[in-house]
Amino acid sequence: MTETDIATIERQIVFNADAIEKLRSGLRGAALLHSEDGYDAARKIYNAMIDHRPAAIVRCAGVADVICAVNFARDNGLLVSVRGGGHNVSGNAVSDGGLMIDLSPMKGIRVDLQNRTVRAEPGVTWGEFDRETQAFGLATTGGLVSTTGIAGLTLGGGLGWLMGNYGLACDNLISADVVTADGRFLNASKSQNEDLFWGLRGGGGNFGVVTSFEFQLHPVGPMLGGMLVHRLDNAAATIKFYDTFTQTSPDELATFVAFATSPEGERVMVIFVSYNGTVEAGERILKPLREFGPPIADMIGPMPYVKVQRMMDDAFPAGRQNYWKSNFLKGLDAEAIRVIVDHVAKAPSPYSAVAIEQFSGAVNRVAIDDTAFNHRNARYNLLIVGIWSDPTAKAANMRWVRDLWSAMQPYSSGGVYVNYLGQEADEGVERVKSAYGAEKYARLVALKQKYDPTNLFRLNQNIRPH
Ligand SMILES: Cc1cc2nc3c(=O)[nH]c(=O)nc-3n(C[C@H](O)[C@H](O)[C@H](O)COP(=O)(O)OP(=O)(O)OC[C@H]3O[C@@H](n4cnc5c(N)ncnc54)[C@H](O)[C@@H]3O)c2cc1C
């Protein structure tokens, strides 16, 4: 951001001083301005490449603060951004010069043991969520990295270790409380505001601010988890075996492949696994996969679910530069793997990686029209994760991601997972349509017209009203 931009924002703040005092008088939480304590910490999100300075940040203490902030932003014509866990790499949680509705202080979680459900507020991360639910031996599908927010992840779909058994995070959503653009408070479920409920399960943050999520929980105990590490020169043969192996593996087995750099600096292929069943059954099912190669390291063993949920955390610390691109794949053919291996060997940063995410089981069994989330029948998603620490290395790292993504286009199905989309200016308006397909996109546009006709909530994977 230039000095002129900063001066513009400062002028806006002075201009709005009276209004901001009025806003503050209506809040239980804080409203932070540019030069105030806590402002810089509150505007930071996971991706350090995003360095935006909102005009004000409302640190919401509860639903009343969210209503107050939405009404204030709308009445003052401010650009609204909504922050849940702050993990979205596009940086939509924070804008330059707008009002940031920061939900991260809202951390309430209440497990209902009798009904095996949980209510969680939108500032909760998956690590916090799992800690509370696992205290009772329960869990639901959540993200692979424990610091990701439950809010954005669920609203876009939400893939994770348990999806083979229980579907996506959004498939486990029972109801949600939502503050809409006109400041109304609605409950959305299969029996109330059913159209909104459909849109919230995959349609992102387009329709309002979700202030509470109610999820179905399932008994989830200690399990087999860990990783198999292979040399890159064995990648093609191993992937061929892996592809055949996973075609008949049970729902309990989740696997994700990553092409990455080991802590010793070697480029490797890693198969991450978890088996959501007994350790004995997991040992039996995984035996052929563990024997194939053989891997240069086998780090699979019994562990609690919360440990499975954290095994990728070290690879994704907050505060590094991130630029990601993705697409669902038509399949896993040998030529595609060769393209990946060639590019991984040339990655400018040791933190960058290429992931292949396997979708299966309960995800495919949910009827395609039940939720806004699309692409249930895709078997593999390709995610190219550019991560580096030196801000001056941006051009080389972004080029690497883009080059690999372009080289993989012949193997892409054309579909994309909305939660991995980058900024609209970079991806283009059409890519969000690829996340939904023409029919669902049209349904989402109609929903947007109904619940947010002025597009107040445009800082997400923007679905425009008519
Ligand atoms: C390290 C890392 C690991 C990841 N792992 C996975 C994974 O395993 N599975 C997976 O499916 N995805 C994964 N993702 C992608 C993730 O789902 C998205 O980045 C998601 O948007 C993050 O949600 P958040 O609340 O943390 O992010 P935020 O940046 O806070 O929000 C993301 C978007 O949702 C909107 N939003 C947030 N909260 C609300 C709310 N309460 N109401 C309305 N709109 C809201 C925001 O405005 C923003 O547009 C990962 C991302 C990262 C960076």
Image (cartoon, rainbow, N blue to C red):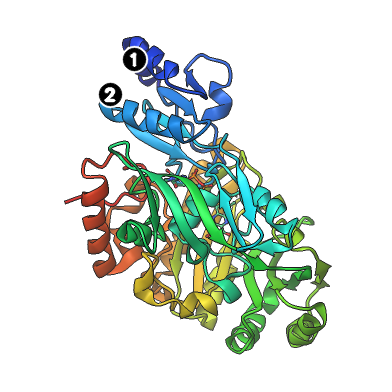
Which residue corresponds to mark 2? 76
Of residues 384 and 18, the one drawn nearer to the viewer in this rendering: 18
Q: Residue at x 26, y 26 (%)?
A: 75
Residue 292: percent from left, percent from top: 75, 85
In the drawing, what numbered circle is on residue 118?
none
Residue 6: percent from left, percent from top: 40, 18
Q: Residue at x 75, y 88 (%)?
A: 288
Q: Secondary structure at mark 2?
A: loop
Mark 1 neighbour density, 10 Å: few (under 14) some (14–19) many (20 or more)? some
Task: Note whether 327 is above or below 47 in the view shown.
Answer: below
**Left or right of 273: which side holds 382?**
left
Residue 46: quarter of image:
top right
Which residue corresponds to mark 1? 19
Identity, as a three-letter code, of the amino acid under mark 1:
Ala
**Left or right of 371: which side holds 293?**
right
- Cα–Cα gap, marks 2 and 1: 8 Å
Return the disc, 2 or 1, that comes first in the chain's sequence.
Answer: 1
Residue 236: percent from left, percent from top: 62, 80
Residue 211: percent from left, percent from top: 47, 43
- The N terminus: image quadrant: top left
